[in-house]
Amino acid sequence: MITKKPERVRVPQLLTMKQKAQKITMLTAYDATMASLLDRAGVDVLLVGDSLGTVILGYDTTLPVTLEAMIHHARAVTNGAQRALVVADLPFLTYQASIPEAVRNAGRLLQEGGAAAVKMEGGVPIADAAQRLVDVGIPVMGHIGLTPQSVHSLGGFRPVGRTRPEAEAVMEDARALQQAGAFAIVLESVPAHVAGAITRELKIPTIGIGAGPACDGQVLVSYDAFGLFDTFVPKFVKQYAQLGEAMTAAAREYVADVQAGRFPGPEHTRSDPPQAK
Ligand code: KIV
């Protein structure tokens, strides 16, 4: 039986989905196995998020994540995904210092990481860099509202856009990114009415995380959604499984089996007769 390879989700398809009012689904992935599992479930976009700094590498923030780490994980995700569009984060300080650096670093995520697009945090201040990437053929997804790479200037991981000036600034950021040619924008921890207003005004899709139901799509950190990372679970997260507990229980059973001599049992032990030489 020949199984047909699923058709790859491509950047322009997200715009068509918005126009047809079809919700876009996005989850983070950091390795080939996870990418393949999520891909089979029909997730449209796999984000190689710099959240890997916290959920994979154990840092408190995303700031220590390097471009090399992002390329390494992007390669793994692109190896595992057949259908989903793979978007990789540009980590802190890889696009803020200069536009030529932004082009080179974003280019490496496509060329070496195999990603189809990059995501970058910030609105008005990074719009020129975003536009240059788009001009040279690198699709850009924006990310505004709570931008974790700016955790120190924000004063913590806190919602953004609750006051009128902040809400207006988020709207301006969204407009600047659309003007720069971004194909979609992540809205993180933004009040639902602000996210709704942005979603209605923009032609390009918005993808929300803690931004209410009006966005054109939703994204979650997969380790949060599946209960793998429990150091801190944001209020807006729905946990669809408790894989962390299941893994600990399985590991506990393995430890008990080995200690009691129950594993490996006869069914896991080869007893081939010796081969004549
Ligand atoms: O790095 C990440 O996982 C992200 C999501 C929270 C959108 O940027």
Image: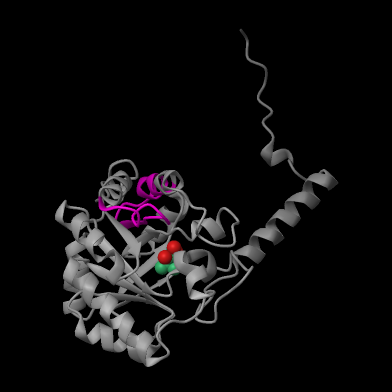
**Residue 91 highlighted magenta (yes or no):** yes
Q: In this view, does 88 lie above or below 2?
A: below
Check the picture and name the quadrant holding the C terminus: top right
Task: Report which quarter residue 42 is drawn in.
Answer: bottom left
Please tell me which residue is depicted at 41% across the width and 91% down the height of the picture.
163
Look at the image and give the residue range highlighted in magenta.
Answer: 73-99
**Residue 98 highlighted magenta (yes or no):** yes
Please tell me which residue is depicted at 43% across the width and 75% down the height of the picture.
146
| Residue 25 coordinates in the image, percent (x, y) | 34, 71
| Residue 181 coordinates in the image, percent (x, y) | 17, 66
Look at the image and tell me whether residue 214 can be seen.
Answer: no
Task: Report which quarter residue 117 is drawn in.
Answer: bottom left
Furthest residue toward right: 260
Furthest residue toward top: 277
Please state the total of marks drawn on the protein image. 0
Q: Nearer the viewer, residue 273 or 155?
A: 155
| Residue 123 coordinates in the image, percent (x, y) | 30, 71
Look at the image and tell me whether residue 38 can be seen.
Answer: yes
